[in-house]
Amino acid sequence: MSRLSYYPPILGYHRVGGFRGDHVPTVSAEAFERQLVFLARGRYRVLELGEVASSLSQAKPLPRRSVAITFDDGYAETHEVAWPLLKRFGFSATVFVAPAEVGWPGFVTWNQVAAMAQDGVTIGCHTMHHSYLPLVGAERLPEELVQSKQVIEERIGRPVTLLSYPVGGFTSQVQLAVQQAGYAAACTTNRASSHPGIDPYALRRIKVTERDGNPVLFWAKLSGYYDVFRRLREPA
């Protein structure tokens, strides 16, 4: 697929809220709200990630000004800060959690995960231990991909069909294992798949930062042609 081709923007967030001086990419609540205002005023269609993945896997074109919103890691602020703002605008989102991290200080609890699921958030899997999958041996992949999926499903009472690769890393063997585990799609970061076209098991996302409170920068990331301006990395 040419880098000049349109690629539906899938926005990737981590923490929304106060800055803590750690390595976690963070967007302030104020900047996040400005971004949501931009989407609303621009009449963007905020779609569920599953809908985007399904359309892409069936080679159905998505209308321009379509966008999906995702969050990695399941920080507490996703429930406390981001979700109330998303609800105010009526926007959907997908939150990827790693079961082994749920309930840790600074992360969502299972009650919060279940509450978001009941309130319309799509809950996806971020592996069991937030593991970089290219370095995980074949004997551990079932725990990271299958058991983690089962744990989340039991907790929220809904099927889990979407995965986010920690740090975006994957290999062709990992992709096969993800597909065999029953996932319909998986998200990466700016890593390019070796498969032609749009690969549902390597959906590229666009990292959103505090700078994207600037409407010009945010518009560029929503254009569908952002790959022209960024370096696509190897899968693993």
Image: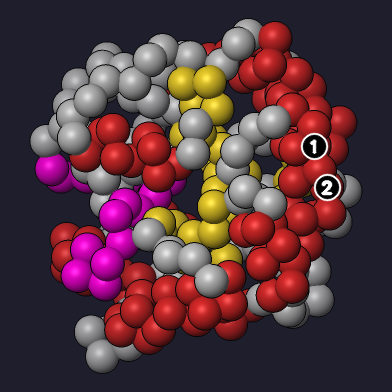
Residue 219 horizontal/vertical position (percent):
58, 13
Residue 148 horizontal/vertical position (percent):
45, 79
Circles 2, 1 touching at the beta carbon (< 8 Å):
yes
Magenta span of residues: 179-195
Q: Quadrant of the C terminus?
A: bottom left
Q: Amino acid at mark 1?
A: Leu
Report the predominant secondary structure element of the magenta stretch. Answer: loop
Quarter location, residue 85? top right
In the shown orientation, is residue 70 left or right of residue 83? left
Callout 1: SS: helix
Give the residue drawn at x 26%, y 90%.
139
175 or 91, which lies in front?
91
Query: Can residue 19 be spotted in the picture?
Result: no
Work out how far the residue at label 2 is from the one at label 1, CA to CA, in angstroms: 7 Å
Callout 2: SS: helix
Give the residue drawn at x 50%, y 26%.
67
- Depicted 183 relative to depicted 87: above or below: below
- Magenta stretch: residue 49 in it? no
- Crowding around mark 1 (Cα neighbors within 10 Å: few <14, some 14 to 19, many 20+) is some
Q: Quadrant of the N terminus?
A: top left
Give the residue drawn at x 83%, y 47%.
81
Quarter location, residue 80? bottom right
In the shown orientation, is residue 18 left or right of residue 157? right
Question: Which residue is the site of mark 1?
Answer: 85
Residue 192 horizontal/vertical position (percent):
27, 41
Label number found at residue 81: 2
- Magenta stretch: residue 193 in it? yes
Give the residue drawn at x 69%, y 75%.
110
Q: Amino acid at mark 2?
A: Val
61 or 157, which lies in front?
157
Quarter location, residue 39? top right
